[in-house]
C-alpha cells in the first residue's frame, strides 16, 4: 500500500475542513426550518461525496486497484465537489428561510410600530435584505462545482449570518412590537368611538332644534295678523251688501205690493 502523496493529503485536509463547515450549516438548518429535518438533496450530495471518498480509499488500500495514478486524487476532488454543492444548497435554504421568517414576523404590524420599536429596520435591515437578493444571485452564479471556490462560499456564509442576526434581533423585539401595536389600536379605537359619539350627539341636537322651533313661516306674529285681516274684511262686505239691499228682487217685490194696496180701485166705486 502506497501512502498518500502530499497533494492528496492536502486535498483530504481541505475536504475535512469543508465538511465540518457544511455540517454546521446543515445542523443549523435542521434546527431552524419548520419541518425540523434536512433537505433530501443535501443528503444525496453527502452520500455521493462519501461514495467517492471510499473509492479513493479502496484504490489506495488495494481493495479496488486502479492503474491510473490520478484516480485517487480525482475521486477526492469529486467528493469535495459534492460537499461543496451540499453547502451551497444548505445556504440557499437558510437564506430563504431567514428572509421569509423576518417577513412573517413583521406581518400584521403597522409601519409606525415597526419604525418606533425597530428604528434601524427601514434604514438598515430592509435595504440589506434587498441587497442580499442580488448578492445571493451573484454568488450562486459563481458557484462552480468543477472548480470550487471557498472564498465565495465564505462570503455567502457571511451574508447569511448577517440575515440571521437580523432575524434574532426581530425575535427579541417581538414582545415590544406586540405591546406597541396593541396600545396603538386601542388609541385608534377610542378616537373612532369618541368621534362617533360626537357626531351622533350633533345629529340628535339638530333634530330636536328643528322639531321644537319649527319652520320660520309659522311665527307668532304672522299667526296673530291673520284673524285681524279677516275682521277688517268682514264689515266691508256687510256694508256693501247693506247699500245694495234695496235692489234685491225680494225687496222690490215687497215694495210694489205695498204700493198696490195704497192705490184706490176705480171699479169699487
Image: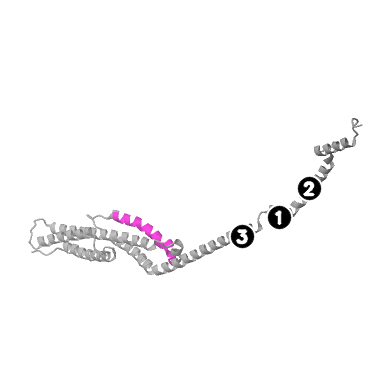
Residue 136 sits inside the magenta stretch: yes
Question: Furthest residue to the front?
Answer: 269
The CA span between labels 3 and 1 is 18 Å
Looking at marks 2 and 3 on the same chain, the residue that comes earlier in the sequence is marked by 3
Q: Which mark is residue 208?
A: 3
**Quarter of the picture holding the N terminus:** bottom left
Q: Position of residue 55 (x, y in %)?
A: 12, 59
The CA span between labels 2 and 1 is 24 Å
In this view of the protein, which residue sits in the foreground, 144 or 159?
A: 159
Neighbour tally class for label 3: few under 14, some 14-19, many 20 plus, Cα within 10 Å: few
Q: Residue at x 80, y 37 (%)?
A: 249
Residue 208 in sight here: yes
Query: Does the residue at mark 2 contact the one at mark 3 (Cβ under 8 Å)?
Result: no
- Disc 3, SS: helix
Disc count in the image?
3
Q: Position of residue 213 (x, y in %)?
A: 66, 58
Q: Which mark is residue 234?
A: 2
Residue 244 in sight here: no
- Disc 1, SS: loop
- Would you name the residue on which mark 1 appears? 219
Q: Residue at x 29, y 65 (%)?
A: 32
Name which quarter of the figure residue 12 lies in.
bottom left
Query: Does the residue at mark 2 contact the one at mark 1 (Cβ under 8 Å)?
Result: no
Q: Which residues are magenta?
A: 117-140
Amino acid at each position: 500500500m502506497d501512502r498518500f502523496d502530499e497533494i492528496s493529503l492536502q486535498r483530504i485536509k481541505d475536504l475535512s475542513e469543508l465538511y465540518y463547515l457544511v455540517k454546521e450549516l446543515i445542523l443549523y438548518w435542521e434546527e431552524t426550518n419548520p419541518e425540523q429535518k434536512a433537505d433530501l438533496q443535501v443528503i444525496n450530495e453527502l452520500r455521493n461525496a462519501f461514495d467517492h471518498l471510499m473509492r479513493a480509499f479502496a484504490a489506495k488500500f488495494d481493495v479496488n486497484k486502479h492503474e491510473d495514478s490520478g484516480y485517487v486524487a480525482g475521486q477526492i476532488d469529486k467528493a469535495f465537489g459534492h460537499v461543496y454543492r451540499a453547502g451551497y444548497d444548505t445556504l440557499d435554504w437558510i437564506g430563504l428561510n431567514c428572509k421569509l421568517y423576518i417577513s412573517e414576523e413583521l406581518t400584521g404590524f403597522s409601519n409606525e410600530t415597526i419604525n418606533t420599536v425597530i428604528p434601524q429596520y427601514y434604514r438598515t435591515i430592509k435595504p440589506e435584505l434587498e441587497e442580499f437578493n442580488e448578492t445571493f444571485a451573484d454568488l450562486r452564479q459563481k458557484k462552480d462545482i468543477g472548480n470550487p471556490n471557498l472564498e465565495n462560499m465564505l462570503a455567502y456564509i457571511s451574508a447569511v449570518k448577517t440575515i440571521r442576526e437580523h432575524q434574532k434581533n426581530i425575535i427579541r423585539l417581538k414582545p415590544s412590537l406586540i405591546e406597541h401595536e396593541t396600545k396603538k389600536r386601542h388609541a385608534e379605537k377610542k378616537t373612532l368611538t369618541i368621534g362617533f359619539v360626537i357626531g351622533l350627539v350633533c345629529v340628535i341636537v339638530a333634530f330636536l332644534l328643528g322639531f321644537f322651533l319649527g319652520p320660520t313661516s309659522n311665527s307668532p306674529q304672522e299667526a296673530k295678523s291673520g284673524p285681524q285681516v279677516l275682521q277688517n274684511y268682514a264689515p266691508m262686505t256687510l256694508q256693501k251688501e247693506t247699500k245694495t239691499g234695496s235692489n234685491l228682487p225680494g225687496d222690490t217685490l215687497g215694495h210694489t205690493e205695498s204700493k198696490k194696496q195704497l192705490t184706490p180701485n176705480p171699479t169699487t166705486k
